[in-house]
């Protein structure tokens, strides 16, 4: 048991350092970045956009961590509608919103190492499903695979690359089959991808380990501080196979317990792409 405490404590310190690297963002926008953002805005005004969404909320336990399925799914849908409304306020036409998965960015290995709580208050069970389909997913296997490939591409390494680009586009690097399938489903080349991630220690874990700083979902490709919840938002150009813009930010909202907020009060959700 002592070794387990030590391993979890080491994970805590690594998680804190990782999140500082991922979520830190500048408070000012350089003239070069502003010019790039303005050009992106002009391109968005000329065609419809769509929103793809994902949610992944984890309860950290002493043994296997728990996927909070119902909360993750609800948070994904709520943020999807929040993003759509923000885009509409900027004069953009959103023709489609889709939330195909829960924890869509996580690998099969990561997901099947965790337990899953299907509903709030339900007893956790070993998770054997991959991918974890959302409650409203009715897509065929080929379509699910295309969307899964896309979400899998937006892993921690890609998020770090986007952060380092400081407004410049980065390669999405999807294969042509996936690009064609998603373009057909979305009906446009411009797609916003929204992802809610977060982790929270259980009461038992907090009491046993004395967590007061950060917790991490070991091996899942993302980390977050205690009680932490984060929103990742990316603009994809399927025609050029690039990520034109992206950001990661903490946000307020009721996500770890049901009912999850139907919308999130998130000032500056599109900043700095659109100046607030």
Image: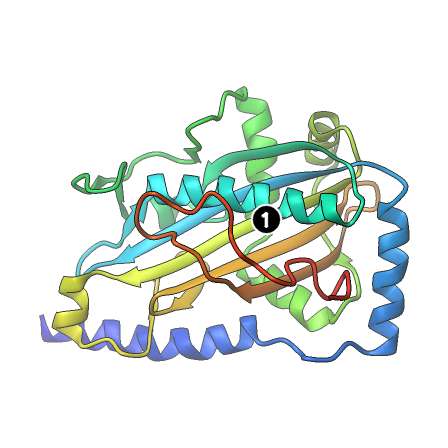
Q: Nearer the viewer, residue 181 or 93?
A: 93
Report the number of numbered marks. Answer: 1
Q: Position of residue 265 (x, y in %)?
A: 53, 56
Is 68 positioned to the left or the right of 163 in the image?
left
Q: Is residue 216 above or below residue 261?
A: below
Question: Residue, x 54% and y 19% (percent of image)?
Answer: 140
**Mark 1 neighbour density, 10 Å: few (under 14) some (14–19) many (20 or more):** many
Q: Is residue 205 above or below residue 135?
A: below
Question: Residue, x 32% and y 78% (percent of image)?
Answer: 213
Q: Is residue 155 above or below residue 33?
A: above
Q: Position of residue 134 (x, y in %)?
A: 44, 32
Is 108 positioned to the left or the right of 152 in the image?
left
Is 223 positioned to the left or the right of 266 in the image?
left
Q: From this viewpoint, is residue 216 visible?
A: yes
Question: Residue, x 63% and y 75% (percent of image)?
Answer: 25
Q: Is residue 90 above or below residue 252?
A: above
Q: Nearer the viewer, residue 270 or 10?
A: 270
Q: Which residue is mark 1?
A: 194
Q: From this viewpoint, is residue 4 visible?
A: no
Q: Position of residue 59 (x, y in %)?
A: 28, 55
The quarter of the image holding the N terminus is: bottom left
Is 269 positioned to the left or the right of 200 in the image?
right
Color encoding of the figure: rainbow
The quarter of the image holding the C terminus is: bottom right
Q: Secondary structure at mark 1?
A: strand
Question: Residue, x 82% and y 78% (percent of image)?
Answer: 30
Picture quadrant where residue 166 is located? bottom right
């Amino acid at each position: 048991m002592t070794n387990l405490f030590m391993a979890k404590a080491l994970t805590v310190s690594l998680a804190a350092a990782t999140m500082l690297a991922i979520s830190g963002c500048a408070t000012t926008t350089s003239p070069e970045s502003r010019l790039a953002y303005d050009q992106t805005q002009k391109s968005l005004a000329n065609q419809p956009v769509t929103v793809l969404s994902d949610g992944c909320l984890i309860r950290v336990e002493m043994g296997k961590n728990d996927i909070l399925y119902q909360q993750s799914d609800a948070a994904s849908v709520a943020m999807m509608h929040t993003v759509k409304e923000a885009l509409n306020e900027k004069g953009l036409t959103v023709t489609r919103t889709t939330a195909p998965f829960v924890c869509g960015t996580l690998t099969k290995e990561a997901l099947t190492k965790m337990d899953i709580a299907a509903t709030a208050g339900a007893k956790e069970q070993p998770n054997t499903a991959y991918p974890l389909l959302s409650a409203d997913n009715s897509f065929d296997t080929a379509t699910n695979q295309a969307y899964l490939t896309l979400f899998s591409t937006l892993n921690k390494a890609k998020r770090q690359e986007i952060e380092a680009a400081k407004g410049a586009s980065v390669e999405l690097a999807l294969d042509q089959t996936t690009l064609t399938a998603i373009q057909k489903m979305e009906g446009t080349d411009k797609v916003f991808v929204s992802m809610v991630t977060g982790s929270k220690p259980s009461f038992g874990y907090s009491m046993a380990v004395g967590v007061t700083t950060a917790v991490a979902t070991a091996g899942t490709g993302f980390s977050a501080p205690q009680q932490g919840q984060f929103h990742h938002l990316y603009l994809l150009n399927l025609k050029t196979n690039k990520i034109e813009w992206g950001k990661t930010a903490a946000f307020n909202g009721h996500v770890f317990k049901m009912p999850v907020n139907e919308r999130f009060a998130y000032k500056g959700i599109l900043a700095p792409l659109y100046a607030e």
